Amino acid sequence: MSIFIKNLANLVGQEVEIKGWLYNKRSSGPIAFLELRDGTGWIQAVAVKAELSPEIWDLVEKVSQESSVAVLGTVSKHPKKDNVYELQVKDFKIIQLAQDYPIAHKEHGPDFLMENRHLWLRSKKQWAILRVRDAIITAIGEYLHQESFIKVDSPVFTPNACEGTTTLFPVPYFDLGTAYLSQSGQLYIEAAIASVGRCYDFGPVFRAEKSKTKRHLTEFWMMDAEAAFVEHDENLNIQEGLVRHIIRYCLKNCKEELTVLERNTEPLEKADQPFTRYTYDQAIAKLHELGSDIKYGEDLGNDDEGLLTKDSEVPVFIAKWPKSIKPFYMKRDPENPELVLNDDLIATEGAGELIGGSQREDDYELLLSRIKAEGLSPEEYQWYLDLRKYGSVPHSGFGIGLERTVRWITGVEHIRECIPFPRTIGRLRP
Ligand code: 4AD
Ligand code: MG
């Protein structure tokens, strides 16, 4: 019977078969140490020449890095390390003998690794990142269902912009003209809340970002959440609850992965406390105190975000921005019509913006005037305006970037490692 490596702890003394790949091999004369990977974990199999037939020992000697193998052996505890197990090899089969695997166990340049992304995914660090990414997705779904959100999918082909017209990807769409790849499913899930109350989508979104930074992809995954009868302050509470749930979930379920990534988890443990809440005005004043030359009314750059959070143990909300630099759908602040009821959430350790959210404009006339003022076509947004005609309610939502979150939790430097097959301005392959 084949067993997953993650389950070996309960099988000490028993004979099991593991199917997987040879990650690494060290030999010292009549003993070979085979490091195996099966997807669920990593284990060292110890093959001793004197205990194997000559045919099997030949296979052990011949097997190469990344060959696929089936290994029969007895599970034992590691002689020195706690919670680490080994396999004493009894039988060994090569399923396919790999030839000259291009990624050796040494430093390679990022371009070479990116070109071999289809193979690079197998390395230990990439394995750990993929698993943390999966854990974050699971944590998000768990938290939202706990808070009575259900998943409602939004389309990828859309006729209009959600986040400004400068980063749209056009696609020819039969006789109907041009479609654009979705920048965010927000507008669609706003429609769905009148059906299900609270909902979220989670899928790939697209932005023709010209920025070549460590934080930008042209295709990334976003979770948009939207809730009826939720106003600005409660919107922030939900976001904070979500992010703290992600931290706790990963600290609990990704210990091995975070160890592989050499992630110091102390800052994450500390981040699980009430978040700081600044208004945009307060953030600008604080930035001036810290020596930034940002002008009131400007968007915060990477450096400003870093400066603002550098001494903070917890993520920082920046709320109520000038409406001139934010999208048309955000609700004006009743206390100051020049501001909107929105927020950006900036993570700690220089990780930058994770979330953009806002209360939505729920008044038909005001929304129409904002659409016109942005030079957008009211006809294209007629369906969205309809939502303000038939049972409009105060409502709010937000979008969290998955890869930005993966980057923060894992501590990986570049966002291109936080998605299996990254798309950036300079990369479309593999
Ligand atoms: O702040 P953004 O643009 O907000 C929206 O799209 C809203 N419609 C969401 C909503 O209210 N439902 O994007 C949300 C998040 C950002 O905070 C960031 O984490 C991520 O998406 N993001 C990117 N991640 C990687 N590469 C890019 N080019 C990104 N642009 C935004
Ligand atoms: Mg944003």
Image (cartoon, rainbow, N blue to C red):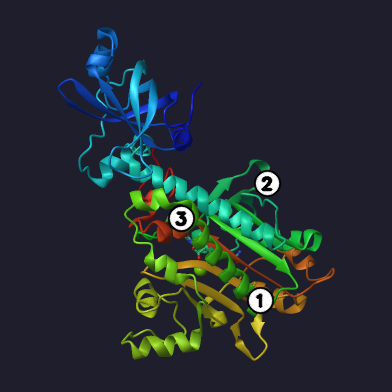
Q: Which mark is residue 234?
A: 1
Q: Position of residue 269 (x, y in %)?
A: 44, 67
User: Nearest the camera: 296 or 346?
Assistant: 346
Q: Position of residue 46 (x, y in %)?
A: 28, 26
Q: Is mark 3 within 8 Å of ligand 1?
A: yes
How many neighbours does mark 2 have within 10 angstroms: few (below 14), some (14-19), or many (20 or more)? few
Q: CA distance from mark 2 to mark 3?
A: 33 Å
Kind of residue sitting beneath label 1: Glu
Circle 1 or circle 3, nearest the eye: 1
Depicted 430 relative to depicted 238: above or below: above
Q: CA distance from mark 2 to mark 1?
A: 40 Å
Q: Is mark 1 within 8 Å of ligand 1?
A: no
User: Nearest the camera: 288 or 310?
Assistant: 310
Residues tagged 1 and 3 counted as in contact (Cβ below 8 A) = no
Residue that sits furthest to the right in the current view: 390
Q: Which mark is residue 176?
A: 2
How many neighbours does mark 3 have within 10 angstroms: few (below 14), some (14-19), or many (20 or more)? many
Which residue occupies 21% across, 23% down? 31
Which residue occupies 67% across, 65% down? 377
The quarter of the rendered structure image containing the C terminus is top left
Q: Quadrant of residue 22?
A: top left
